[in-house]
Image (cartoon, grey):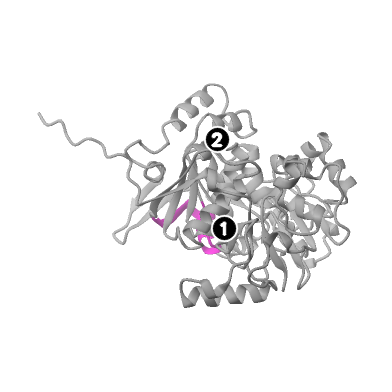
């Protein structure tokens, strides 16, 4: 009697992919079932496409939306949005929700917020799911042990109509961060250090699974920050195996399973992690103790260095292509090689976004700000990631700390992260930002963006220049 071949060891990507595979095509594409479709106020073209063809969403109960990209963060009434174009996009989302029967958290709803904040917050995003959204930072939800990735509007339309999507399976990469993070080092510093190591295109064609003791020690909100920026290393998605931290976070949320269904879900989710002997296409390891508070200096995410470093010299680049890119970046950023990063002045500070707009982010920033005052040259904003984050912060008195220090306390939304809502940084001005991209013009035409953690941004707001937050935390 044949005993058969032993089952091959599987990665978490293998497991979730196979569980959602409907059909494999000869060209290597797989038709995947999509568990959750998250949408925002930029979806008007997709709904117009469906309507023109007489189609309706295949599974409206699997669609969850919120206005975030195009809403200003100083008003909560749609009628008060000053731009007719942006107001129309928000109204379109509301009207389509009513007509087509999907769930939307409207602008006046306390649950409204950035789509990648409210998904985990509401328990909409869960381990083992496939999740898509027409937004690059959908990888955020992979922190829960989901396969979550951004899609283009054409693909989003396909998912609306069929609840499925043709995809080619990516390769697998495991990035292990081992050891304990040093004093003053956060999840944002971890992901910036990872991108510095592998490059802004280092994970193209891969799904990253983050592992190692430093990753396991992160809170869920820290894990969300890490997975959020997977796309900035070129990855299709980022994932972290679900564990007790995950289960404790998901339990009791509005859309999470409960009772007997919860017990069965946890049993199923506990099997999602990669098998111990699973083989990855690429392995990368970082020593957590070597990671310092990080800050970007250029216009790519790989243009990043520890805060105690100098602006690098393009003449020391390894290739002519890199030398040219660095030179262009420094010209745009108005920086000279050899300048201490910690001496670069800032004009604006933005603490928020789907990367760092959660309650732990605001708590950590408030701890730095408390009892201090924003530098007179700096305009500083706090933009909570959701209405519930804002309410929790106000219940804890964090808003009072920020307001007393001279920050503006705003409503929830994407805000200065991308500037599509009318909120921008002026040309030539420099912004210390907790968002996820420092591209040319990302925060406004000619705006100069330095990415960092919430505590680092808070420190810059106080001193008026990029600052090693550890000075504040040690009481120096």
- Residue 338 or 299: which is nearer the viewer? 338
Position of the N terminus by quadrant: top left
Q: Give the range drawn in magenta.
A: 149-168
Residue corresponding to mark 1 = 136
Q: How far across and how far down the image is residue 213, in percent?
A: 49, 37
Q: Rounded to the nearest whole Å, what is the CA distance between mark 2 and mark 1?
A: 26 Å
Q: State the SS at label 1.
A: helix
Q: How far across and how far down the image is residue 177, in percent?
A: 49, 44
- Residue 71 or 440: which is nearer the viewer? 440
Density class for disc 2 (Cα within 10 Å; few <14, some 14-19, many ≥20) is some
Residue found 34% across the figure and 52% down from its top: 281
Residue found 50% across the figure and 23% down from its top: 263
Q: How far across and how far down the image is residue 20, in percent?
A: 41, 44
Q: How far across and how far down the image is residue 375, in percent?
A: 85, 56
Q: Is residue 194 left or right of residue 94?
A: left
Position of the C terminus by quadrant: top right
Density class for disc 1 (Cα within 10 Å; few <14, some 14-19, many ≥20) is many
- Residue 330 or 362: which is nearer the viewer? 330
Q: How many marks?
A: 2
Q: Is any atom of residue 150 visible in this view?
A: no
Residue found 32% across the figure and 45% down from its top: 279
Residue corresponding to mark 2 = 217
Q: Is residue 226 left or right of residue 110?
A: left
Residue found 68% across the figure and 50% down from its top: 114
């Amino acid at each position: 009697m044949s005993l058969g071949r032993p089952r091959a060891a599987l990665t978490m990507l293998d497991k979730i992919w196979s569980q959602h595979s409907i059909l494999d095509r000869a060209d290597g594409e797989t038709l995947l079932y999509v568990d959750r479709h998250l949408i925002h106020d930029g979806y008007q073209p997709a709904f117009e496409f469906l309507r023109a063809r007489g189609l309706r969403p295949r599974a409206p109960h699997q669609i969850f939306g919120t206005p975030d990209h195009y809403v200003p963060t100083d008003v909560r009434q749609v009628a008060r949005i000053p731009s007719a174009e942006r107001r129309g996009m928000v109204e379109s989302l509301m009207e389509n929700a009513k007509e087509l029967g999907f769930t939307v958290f409207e602008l006046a709803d306390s649950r409204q917020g950035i789509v990648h904040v409210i998904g985990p917050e509401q328990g909409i995003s869960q381990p083992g799911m496939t999740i898509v959204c027409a937004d690059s930072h959908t990888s955020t939800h992979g922190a829960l042990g989901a396969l979550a990735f951004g899609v283009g509007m054409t693909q989003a339309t396909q998912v609306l109509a069929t609840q499925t999507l043709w995809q080619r399976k990516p390769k697998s990469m495991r990035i292990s961060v081992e050891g304990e993070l040093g004093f003053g080092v956060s999840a944002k510093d971890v992901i910036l250090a990872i991108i510095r190591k592998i490059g802004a295109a280092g994970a193209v064609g891969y799904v990253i699974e983050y592992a190692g003791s430093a990753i396991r020690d992160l809170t869920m909100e820290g894990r969300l920050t890490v997975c959020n920026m997977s796309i900035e290393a070129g990855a299709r998605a980022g994932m972290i195996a679900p564990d007790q931290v995950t289960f404790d976070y998901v339990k009791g949320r509005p859309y999470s399973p409960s009772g007997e269904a919860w017990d069965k879900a946890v049993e199923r989710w506990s099997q999602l992690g990669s098998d111990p002997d699973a083989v990855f296409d690429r392995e990368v390891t970082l020593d957590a103790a070597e990671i310092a508070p990080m800050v970007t200096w250029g216009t790519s995410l790989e243009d990043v260095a520890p805060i105690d470093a100098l602006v690098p010299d393009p003449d020391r680049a390894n290739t002519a292509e890199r030398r040219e890119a660095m030179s262009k970046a420094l010209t745009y950023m108005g920086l000279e090689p050899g300048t201490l990063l910690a001496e670069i002045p800032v004009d604006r500070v933005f603490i928020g976004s789907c990367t760092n707009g959660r309650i732990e982010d605001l708590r950590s920033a408030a701890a730095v700000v408390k009892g201090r005052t924003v530098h007179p040259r700096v305009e500083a904003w706090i933009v909570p990631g959701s209405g519930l984050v804002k309410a929790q912060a106000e219940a804890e008195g964090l808003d009072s700390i920020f307001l007393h220090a001279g920050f503006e306390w705003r409503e929830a939304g994407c805000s200065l992260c991308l500037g599509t809502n009318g909120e921008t940084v002026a040309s030539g001005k420099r912004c210390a930002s907790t968002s996820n991209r420092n591209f040319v013009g990302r925060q406004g035409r000619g705006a100069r963006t330095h990415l960092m953690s919430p505590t680092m941004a808070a420190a810059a707001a106080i001193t008026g220049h990029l600052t090693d937050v550890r000075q504040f935390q040690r009481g120096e």
